[in-house]
Image (cartoon, grey):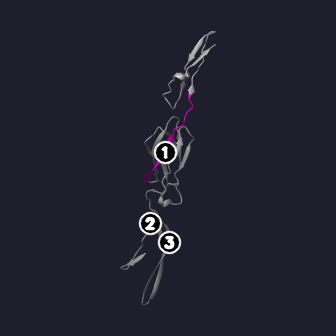
Amino acid sequence: ATTEDQGLFLHYVPNQQGLANLTVTGCSVDGCVSDTMLVDVDPSNTAAQLVPSPLAPVVVQEGGAEVQVDLASVFVDIPELTSTDGLFYTVADTDAPNLLGMNMTTTLLSLQPLGDETGSAALQIRANDQVDNAVQAELSVTVLPVNDVPDASDFSRILTEDASIVLSPLNHVTDPDNENVNPADNNVLTVTL
């Protein structure tokens, strides 16, 4: 507080609220007189602000286990420094919507890598307070490929006695990770019964 031209001016500290007793004393040649007044500073609703630490990148494997990201440590609503109850979280945007399954519960974002999907995504995470002030942070997610097991189709054949059959095993094998599985000359099997 300062005084100027017989006026008392209160200077408020940013992001602070509450009650305070302010005692004002005035003195002249005849003596001093004091009076105490109660100052009540109500919080103003400011936009949610980011905590200095950004979201750490997430790396998962295709079709892997669900991963949870705690958003409570990333966003803070300044008037509510002791609580994040006033914030609501959403995934506002993503550049790869088919890469992950996503679910938001309170402050946890659950990410489920989908099978046979790989690549990178930038998720825009939005925090809104109760009067719709909003702020965003980016979460980088990378889904790494997994070497899937090749699949062999049925090799069964019906033969008559003393007959031969020539099989090309690779004609019966598919590999989800390699569409170019081609039989080679040395992959021929001849069976005589």
The vertical placement of 35 against 179, above or below, is below
The reply to whether the C-beta atoms of the residues labelled 3 and 2 are less than 8 Å apart is no
Q: Which residue is mark 2?
A: 14
In the image, farthest residue toward the top: 161
Q: Residue at x 47, y 47 (%)?
A: 140
According to the image, label 1 marks what residue?
141
Image quarter hosting the N terminus: bottom left
- Magenta: main secondary structure equals strand
Q: Which mark is residue 20?
A: 3
Mark 2 secondary-structure assignment = loop
Q: Amino acid at mark 1?
A: Val
User: How many residues crowd around disc 3 within 10 Å: few (fewer than 14), some, or many (20 or more)?
Assistant: few
Q: How many neighbours does mark 1 have within 10 angstroms: few (below 14), some (14-19), or many (20 or more)? A: many
Kindly give the residue lying farthest to the left in the view shown. Answer: 5
- What residue lies at 55% left-to-right and 46% top-to-bottom? 68
Viewer-nearest of discs 2 and 1? 1
Give the residue type that dot 2 points to. Answer: Pro
Residue occupying the far front of the picture: 186
**What segment carries the magenta color?**
133-150
- Would residue 122 be counted in the magenta stretch? no
2 and 1 marks in contact (CB < 8 Å):
no
Q: Amino acid at mark 3?
A: Ala
